[in-house]
Image (tube, rainbow, N blue to C red):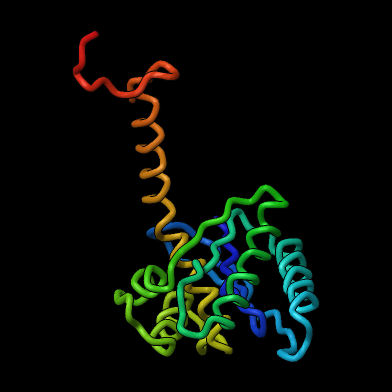
Amino acid sequence: MRVLGVDPGLTRCGLGVVEGSAGRPLRMAAVGVVRTLANAPVAERLVLVERGMEEWLDAHRPDVVAVERVFSQHNVSTVMGTAQASAVAMLCAARRGLPVALHTPSEVKAAVTGSGRAGKDQVGAMVTRLLRLDAPPKPADAADALALAICHIWRAPALDRLQQARAAAVSRAPRRKAGRGPSKGRTA
């Protein structure tokens, strides 16, 4: 499996491609960031993120795109930029028919380091170790993108089984006739 991890951001959008499967050694195929100027209009910055995403999708042809799920932060302007960059990444993937997986920062940290509260240095150190790199990728956004890809590769088999179980449960559920609610035990 080839996964493009995306650590969304308007100033620096981290991108990392990892190949492999759960239980097997992983290999980094590429890592980098798409940068935009903080003083540029937001619309222009989003176009630059979109162009960067499209270039990475063309160059690396991932099977799936794993994006960090936006979570609430105290700084509303930061969360807005993150959400906008995240939407651009999801749109670019969906346009190509690629599956998109969302992972929270704590899920990624727990998968890679064993602790959902790990710091950026710990994540960078574990990414370096897991991918057998000489040094942690810089900036931290790049290391975080690789961590997202690793997390998805390791979690994908369990997520697939869960999705299959849900689909099977839905198909086995008794179907009610349209227009009738659940019986309340009343007689006419």
Q: Is residue 123 visible?
A: yes
Q: Is residue 98 above or below residue 108?
A: above
Left or right of 125? Residue 62 is right
Tell me residue 106's x, y (percent).
Answer: 37, 72
| Direction top: furthest residue | 188
Q: Residue at x 56, y 68 (%)?
A: 5
Tell me residue 43's x, y (percent).
Answer: 77, 75
Tell me residue 101's x, y (percent).
Answer: 52, 57
How many marks the image carries: the answer is 0
Q: Is residue 32 visible?
A: no
Closer to the camera in the image, 82 or 76 = 76
Instruction: Assign the C terminus to one quadrant of the image.
Output: top left
Q: Residue at x 74, y 73 (%)?
A: 46
Q: Residue at x 46, y 72 (%)?
A: 71
Left or right of 164? Residue 40 is right
Q: Residue at x 60, y 65 (%)?
A: 4
Q: Quadrant of residue 79?
A: bottom right
Q: Quadrant of residue 129?
A: bottom left
Q: Is residue 8 above or below residue 75?
A: above
Left or right of 128? Residue 61 is right
Instruction: Assign the N terminus to one quadrant of the image.
Output: bottom right
